[in-house]
Image (spheres, rainbow, N blue to C red):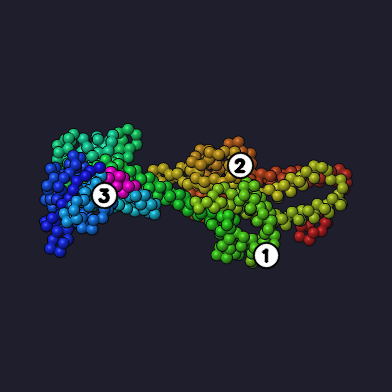
Amino acid sequence: MLFYRDLFRRRSYDEKDKPIDYQFLEVSPSFEHQTGIKDGAGRWMREIAPDQDAFWFETYGRIAKDRKGERFEYFSTPLARWWSVYAFPIDAPEQRRIGVLFNDITERKTREQQQAFLLQFSDTLRTDSNVDAVANRSLQMLSEHLRLDRCYVGVYQLADDHGEFPYQVGNDRVPPMPDSVRLSDFPDALQVAFHRTLVIEDVAKAEGLTDTDRKNLGALGLCALVAASLRSGEANPLWSIVAVSASPRHWTLSEIKLIEEVTERTWAAIERVKADETLRKSEEQFRRALKEAPIPVIMHAQDGQVLQISRTWTEPTGYLPEEVPTFDGWLAEAYGEGADSVRRHMQALFRGQARTMNIDFPVLTRYNGLRHWSFSASSPGTLSDGRRFIVGMAVDITERKQAQEQLQAFNQRLERQVTERTQALKESHDLLQSVFDTTLFSMVVVKARRDEGGAITDFGIQVVNRQLVKLTGRTDLVGNLLGELYPGIREKGLFALMLQVIETGEPAQTEYYYGHEGFDAWFTSTFVKMDDGLLVTNLDITARKEAEMENEKHLQILKQSEEVAHMGSWAYDMGSGQFT
């Protein structure tokens, strides 16, 4: 705490009794240390600091005349310090003297201002959605806050002896930085940046710089600077924010720490924007895959909002996407009162009471009458806004249902007329029934891997669904090459068919037996081109194939039995529903 007295005399006021100067009569021993003013007693403030702020003359003059003490905090421009002040009248009123107790609070004020700046800084960067906007906004805010002549981002390519300056702001006191420089032109300065923040208050006088450093830094118009670097490991700077002054400048510790903090926060904000952009592109690719899926697919949020729907969902039903903005609305249109059953299953998924759901239900289409769908859904997670979502896939099983009904009628009549059917024939029927009732789809998105000549050498696995994981028994498919994991696709001609789809852009479908890499199954596969890749859907039809072969076997047995027993048999006409 300091104490001194001010004397306001005729020199202190103008003709209109307005305070224009003040004189120090007595000062405390710590006065010089606090203010930097030497031999203050007897001196006038206008002599010491001609550009002193008018606030101080007006405030001290008011207290001297009104005889009322005041407490306040204020900044002195010429002294470049903040003060906490208590000024009060002393002695006789006509002498207009005051006593002043004050304390240097510059460090506290600086911390408060910088903390407020950093809060505003982070909030502002959070609103920018691209890398350029983040970098430019960061440099502009730092430059204005510290009153810099130039501020720029430096990116280091140590292996190539190359530094770039992709972003910068500044005034004409320091010329713009070139697009790039050779790092070897600044050997000592760069060595410091390898290990810690580089601080130079005056390039011409700074110790530890070579003549090369001084010459080249000076050629860039740099006089004082702070370079705060982010590093990858020891002595490996990657990226810096550099604060520049056109004239010598004493950088305070709080200013250096602020530049370091801004550098870290800017880097983090840029990385966040890059991650958001990558996520957005990934989501767009996923949405395109859903939209172009060869089977009906829908993705909707917990509140019912339809997030994505495939054309193979809307086109067969005749309902346009804008006509069914919510899944519940679609159920009401296509399923009527029976939609309540599906709704209950959906709510069980959202509440976590079930991981998946599988349900068959009739769908009333707009133009093709009643169809039957087998619907499967799961709730894999939450959206960025916290809402849970569901991905559902459907298979049109109308023909299968009709075949089931015809088969059931056939079995009923056959059982009434042929009581000697064996248990083996019943098991064959059960197997066929199982084939009709079971549908397994798997999906995979692959991207072409090409050699230097542009020829496709393999396909990288990018996205798989749960059915494929269940089918293969592998959870590590993504990131591997399809041809390396399953070389049998080349022998079966599937790889060639995939190349054909990539080249022509025309979808293809094939049915085949696969007996490689531990598989012993029949599949039907569909290939649809997506950019430089494919959306592949697989359906395991092994059960159907085996059922067909088993049925043929039993018919042959039946024929042989009839020949031995000298019996006749009946042929069932599927069209007329009659036995002959």
Magenta stretch containing residue 113, yes or no?
yes
| Residue visible at 21% across and 49% down in the picture | 99
| Residue visible at 82% across and 58% down in the picture | 578
Task: Say which label, 2 or 3, has the lower sequence index.
Answer: 3
Which residue position is annotated with label 3?
86
In the displayed structure image, the side of residue 468 where residue 250 appears, left or right:
left
Label 2 to label 3: alpha-carbon separation: 78 Å
Farthest residue toward the bottom?
367
Amino acid carrying mark 1 in the image: Gly
Task: Say which label, 3 or 1, has the lower sequence index.
Answer: 3
Q: Quadrant of residue 470?
A: top right
Q: Nearer the viewer, residue 152 or 58?
A: 58
Magenta stretch containing residue 74, yes or no?
no
Label 1 to label 2: alpha-carbon separation: 35 Å
Q: Look at the numbered disc 3 and give the secondary structure of its residue.
A: strand
Crowd rating for badge 2 (residues with CA inside 10 Å; few <14, some 14–19, many 20+)? few
Which residue position is annotated with label 1?
369
Amino acid carrying mark 3 in the image: Tyr
Residue 225 visible here: no
Label 3 to label 1: alpha-carbon separation: 89 Å
Residue 389: give x, y in percent of width and height: 56, 52
| Above or below: residue 211 compared with residue 328 | above
Q: Nearer the viewer, residue 569 or 489?
A: 489
| Residue visible at 50% across and 55% down in the picture | 288
Which residue position is annotated with label 2?
470
Amino acid carrying mark 2 in the image: Lys
Viewer-nearest of labels 3 and 1?
3
Viewer-nearest of labels 2 and 3?
3
Q: Look at the numbered disc 2 and give the secondary structure of its residue.
A: helix
Q: Look at the numbered disc 1 and give the secondary structure of its residue.
A: loop
Write down the region rendered in magenta. Answer: 105-115
